[in-house]
Image (cartoon, rainbow, N blue to C red):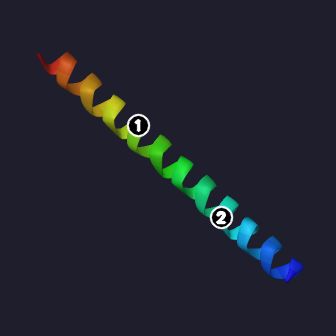
């Protein structure tokens, strides 16, 4: 049981960090996109 709990928490942490990285990448992409649009006008 203890190993199961540790495994589940570890998986949740991995997923959470992956989601954070994905959000950061999306933010960077949008920032670049907005920057390009503003400078083209």
Tell me if residue 40 comes above or below residue 21 in the rendering.
above
Q: Residue at x 68, y 69 (%)?
A: 11
The disc, 1 or 2, on the residue closer to the chain's N-terminal end is 2
Q: Which mark is residue 12?
A: 2
Badge 2: how crowded within 10 Å, few (<14), some, or many (20+)?
A: few
Q: Residue at x 33, y 31 (%)?
A: 32
C-alpha distance separating marks 1 and 2: 22 Å
Left or right position of 19 against 34: right
Q: Residue at x 72, y 73 (%)?
A: 8
Residue wearing tag 1: 27
- Which is more toward the observer, 1 or 29? 1
Report x, y in % for residue 29.
36, 39
Report x, y in % for residue 9.
74, 66
Left or right position of 10 against 26: right
Most extreme residue toward the left, as rendered? 41
Closest to the camera, between mark 1 and mark 2, is 2
Q: Secondary structure at mark 1?
A: helix
- Point out the image quarter for the C terminus: top left
Report x, y in % for residue 37.
18, 25
Image quadrant assignment for residue 39: top left
């Amino acid at each position: 049981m203890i190993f199961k709990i540790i495994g589940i928490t570890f998986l949740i942490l991995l997923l959470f960090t992956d989601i954070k990285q994905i959000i950061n990448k999306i933010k960077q992409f949008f920032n670049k996109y907005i920057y390009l649009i503003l400078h083209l006008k």
